[in-house]
């Protein structure tokens, strides 16, 4: 399995959705879509195109290419959500 099922609810009632992925199994941009879909309770294929909010190639390259000793992270806004993706495999979606 490429990911732990997204967990809705999150810390301190903030309504965040968290998921962990293995970047060798699933691309970061795909993981973001899956987690956004879970957070919004919608089919990811019905969401606005993710490329309108972030450069997908840059996201995938940056998150996947971080060296073992360093971590990389990307945070951006998608509609009314803040999306945080890090090289350790975590995706966090939180309403803003």
Image (cartoon, rainbow, N blue to C red):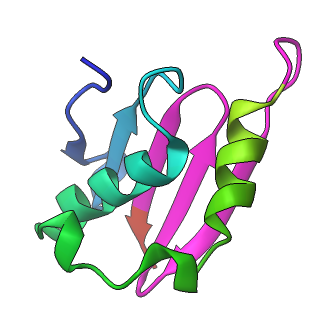
- Residue at image location 51% in from the left, 70% down from the top: 82
Magenta segment boundaries in residue numbering? 67-93
Q: Is residue 74 left or right of residue 27?
A: right
Judge whether 89 appears above or below 75 on screen: above
Q: Is residue 67 left or right of residue 57?
A: right
In percent of width and height, residue 74 lies at 70, 55
In percent of width and height, residue 24 lies at 52, 20
In percent of width and height, residue 50 lies at 47, 74
Q: Is residue 89 magenta?
A: yes
Judge whether 5 appears above or below 42 on screen: above
Between residues 13 and 35, which one lies in front from this camera angle? 35
Judge whether 74 appears above or below 23 on screen: below
- Residue at image location 69% in from the left, 33% down from the top: 64
The number of discs equals 0
In percent of width and height, residue 40 lies at 20, 70
Q: Please tell me in which quadrant of the rendered image residue 20 appears.
A: top left
Q: Is residue 3 magenta?
A: no
- Image quarter where the N terminus lies is top left
């Amino acid at each position: 399995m490429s990911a732990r099922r997204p967990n809705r609810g999150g810390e301190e009632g903030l309504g965040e959705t968290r998921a962990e992925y293995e970047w060798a199994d699933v691309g970061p941009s795909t993981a973001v879509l899956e987690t956004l879909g879970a957070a919004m309770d919608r089919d990811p294929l019905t969401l606005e195109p993710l490329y309108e909010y972030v450069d997908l190639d840059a996201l995938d390259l940056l998150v996947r290419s971080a060296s073992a000793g360093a971590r990389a992270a990307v945070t951006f806004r998608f509609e009314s959500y803040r999306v945080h993706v890090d090289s350790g495999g975590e995706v966090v979606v939180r309403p803003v």
